Image (spheres, rainbow, N blue to C red):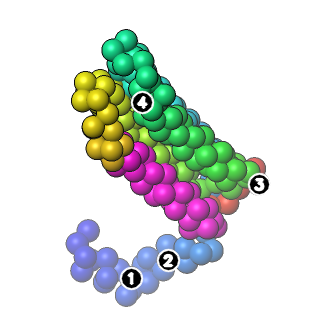
Amino acid sequence: FGSSTVIEAARSHQLGAMAFSASTVLAVCAPQSYFIASLGVAAAIVFANLGAAYGTAKAGAGIATMGIMRGDMVMRSLIPVVMAGVLGIYGLITAVIINGKLDKPDTLSAYTAYALLGAGLCVGMSSAAAGYAIGIVGDIGARCNALANGKLFVGMILILIFAEALGLYGLIVGLVVTASSVEHGAGLCTSYLS
């Protein structure tokens, strides 16, 4: 079919039976949409906790090594571990909010499901990247700060703040996507139970 053939057929009313309004005929919601949205819950918490665990382990190893040389600086050097732990909280918050949007699985549209999956991946992967950065900076920064007698502390904290901001950016975008996904995806399909 060329475009002119379709236009000619429509003019001669050969396709008149196929013309309908999209608002009167809606697709049935797919049952797997709930599974796809649930993957967003899992992605948010799993990837955020992977980042938090890596950041905590890597920075903790550096702090332990540094503690042998300068035991008096251990408490000040725990900041990377705390910052890495916050990344897990980002994933938890997002997972709970996404899960709260899954109250009607029979009318969950594919649009909403994929938006919730995207929100979970956004938060989870951003937190994983931030955890990696915090772990590396926390490990090397704690050791170098001990060797420099505390002169690198402010610089290390600034680097850690910018690394943590990566996870915060992902959290903000994920929450915006989650908040708008249900209203934009509402009414796109009918319940598969009816």
Q: Residue at x 51, y 35 (%)?
A: 82
Q: State the residue position of label 3.
A: 194
Q: Name the image quarter holding the N terminus.
A: bottom left
Element carrying mark 1: helix
Decide which of tag 4 and tag 1 comes sooner along the chain: 1
Q: Is residue 1 within the magenta segment?
A: no
Q: Residue type at mark 3?
A: Ser
Residue 22 lies in quadrant: bottom right
> In this orientation, does residue 48 appear?
no
Q: Name the image quarter holding the C terminus.
A: bottom right
**Do the numbered discs 1 and 2 sit on residues whose CB atoms are within 8 Å?**
yes
Q: Residue at x 33, y 38 (%)?
A: 153
> How far is disc 2 from disc 4 in space, using C-alphas?
69 Å
Q: Which mark, by number, is residue 10?
A: 1
> In this orientation, does residue 25 appear?
yes
* Tag in front: 2 or 4: 4
Q: State the residue position of label 4.
A: 77
> How far is disc 3 from disc 1 in space, using C-alphas?
34 Å
**Do the numbered discs 3 and 1 sit on residues whose CB atoms are within 8 Å?**
no
Instruction: State the residue in front, 181 or 111.
Output: 181
Q: Which residues are magenta?
A: 159-188
Element carrying mark 4: helix
Residue 15 lies in quadrant: bottom left
Specify the principal SS of the magenta part.
Answer: helix
Q: Position of residue 68 (x, y in %)?
A: 37, 12
**Do the numbered discs 3 and 4 sit on residues whose CB atoms are within 8 Å?**
no
